[in-house]
Image (cartoon, rainbow, N blue to C red):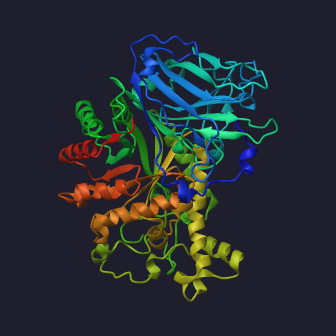
Amino acid sequence: MKRIFALLVLSLLPLGLFAGQSLPVYDAYRTTARIKIDGKLTEKAWAGAAESREFRDIRGEGYPAPTMPTTVKMLWDNDYLYIGATIKETEVKGSLKEHDSIIYKDNDFEVFLDPYCDGKLYYELENNVLGTVMDLMMEKPYSEGGVFIMNWDCKGLQIATSVDGTLNRAGDRDNAWYVEMAIPFDALTREFRDPRLNKVWRVNFSRVEWLKPEGPEENWVWSPTGKVDIHVPSMWGYLRFCEGSFIPELPHAKIVKNWMWERIRKEWSDEQYAAHFKKAYGCGICAILFEGYDERVFRLCKEAGLEAHYWKWTMNRAELLESHPEWFAVNRNGESTSDKPAYVDYYRFLCPSHPEVAEYLAEDYLKCARLKYVDGMHLDYVRYPDVILPVSLWKNYNIEQTSELPEYDYCYCDLCRAKFKEQTGQDPLELKYPQENQSWINFRLDAITTVVEKIHKTLADDGKFLSAAVFPGPSMARKMVRQDWGNWPLKAYFPMIYNGFYYEGPEWIGKSVKESVKAVQGHADIYAGLMFPDIKGEDFEKALDAAYDNGASGISFFDGPDEEGLDRLKAYLEAHDYAPAR
């Protein structure tokens, strides 16, 4: 809904610069006092609430500071989130009076709320100085093909404004106008989930200011997004719901989101699972990635306050061996994974160049994403078979992969050869040095990317969250498995930085995270995938230091952690003032 055409022509902040900036955090405290919504912010409760930092240019650092300050305060009780805004203004004016008018054609104040921190469905409230409201819901950001839902109304919203000056009188000098609103939590309920259960939300605030009647408009926000587009939930700040009273000198904790990869244990009882999830939640785990689906287990996971994501293999699909043997990848020796897989029997990789493969996978993931209690889908094996294995595994197969051996180099099927020859005039089987031919390398990188884009678009159209387990660092991923994940459209990546596989210490984790964070340029979260058995002893804390200090949005553990490891995670988070995203 917002300034769609303007986004295409206005300049962008260099994202490499912006990515290093930290996102703001606001601690909102519970109030027991009655808040009268009159737009005056005079109650004692407001006096005890923290004032936010001043708004900034939406593009971030390197752009002019706003000429007039804007700040917000927040409080909450059992029923409402309260927002109070102070908008300094030398000429207070407004004209729009009809509900759901395009409010930003006036000078306005805007609120963006993502109570579930997933960027799927979020809420937008805009108002002008007259108190006229435009409220809508977004199914996802515009950049992902989202559309606005104008027939959503924030039922029970209370809003009032006041003016320090004279309204709509040109020529005199005004001081400010104020907004006070009470947003009912009930209006933000999604499916069966009560937003009050989430102790951390993603939020942002915007002020549109027309310094000149003919424009251009100014976009001043609490948390800059790096470009003239407020609809980037991954760049919004954090709202934390706190008990007690505001303490000005209390430092803000950094918000992190920690995960665990797990297999379904069908032999576990409800009581065992409930205890397991309670322990994980209490020690700082926020979400579980399950290899497989069991409605009972997913329900118990969510009842414990954790997100439940379905982890499913992508290109490695043995279920198609009988129905579509022609879809499987072929190596440089002419051998298909359908009957002669590389390394191990379960390496049954599909060829990504077949358009039917992308269609099949997209439909399969969408079907799984629609299962009850599934918060998102997690891709794995989104690649070709390893042309180069981690060095620690060479001994297992009695090989030395100091070059790309033909039996592990895929895909030379008839379709890939024909497509590549049509593009370049060359048959890849006739290349003298295929490992050095950039066109052939890019052909295969692009083929996997096309599959990911198809899956992403299919799930995005249904409003589903999508993430992927990937090889550590885009440079290693391209070399080892033809995986160019730095150019994929996802919002979350889990590089599997298993340092023991590469005979590396925990400090290498930091270098890999740093490369990954740089590659996504602020457009996605990086969750450092750690092999728990490889980071025991003193390496545990060192590995966490390496990941968090280099920009990881959280940790994801594979093959653990056990209860002792969870306790150590909890102690680490508390000692370093990290707060789990809830």
View extreme (right): residue: 214
Is residue 333 depicted above or below 191 in this figure? below
Name the residue nearer the viewer: 144 or 582: 582
View extreme (bottom): residue: 432
Q: Is residue 208 left or right of residue 333?
A: right
Query: Is the C terminus in the top left, top right, bottom left or bottom right quadrant?
Result: top left
Number of numbered discs overlaid on the protein picture: 0
View extreme (front): residue: 172
Q: Is residue 422 left or right of residue 452?
A: right
Query: Is the N terminus in the top left, top right, bottom left or bottom right quadrant?
Result: top right
Question: x%, y% of residue 56?
Answer: 58, 42
Q: Is residue 382 visible?
A: no
The residue shown at (30%, 56%) is 545
Question: x%, y% of residue 302?
Answer: 37, 32
Question: x%, y% of residue 550?
Answer: 39, 58
Q: Is residue 167 visible?
A: yes
Quadrant of the image occupied by residue 496:
bottom left
The residue shown at (29%, 40%) is 266
Is residue 526 depicted above or below 57 in this figure? below
Q: Is residue 412 left or right of residue 6?
A: left
Name the residue nearer the viewer: 229 or 42: 42
Name the residue nearer the viewer: 441 or 291: 441
Question: x%, y% of residue 397?
Answer: 31, 76
Is residue 537 depicted above or below 178 in this figure? below
Name the residue nearer the viewer: 211 or 563: 211
Quadrant of the image occupied by residue 162:
top right
The residue shown at (73%, 42%) is 4
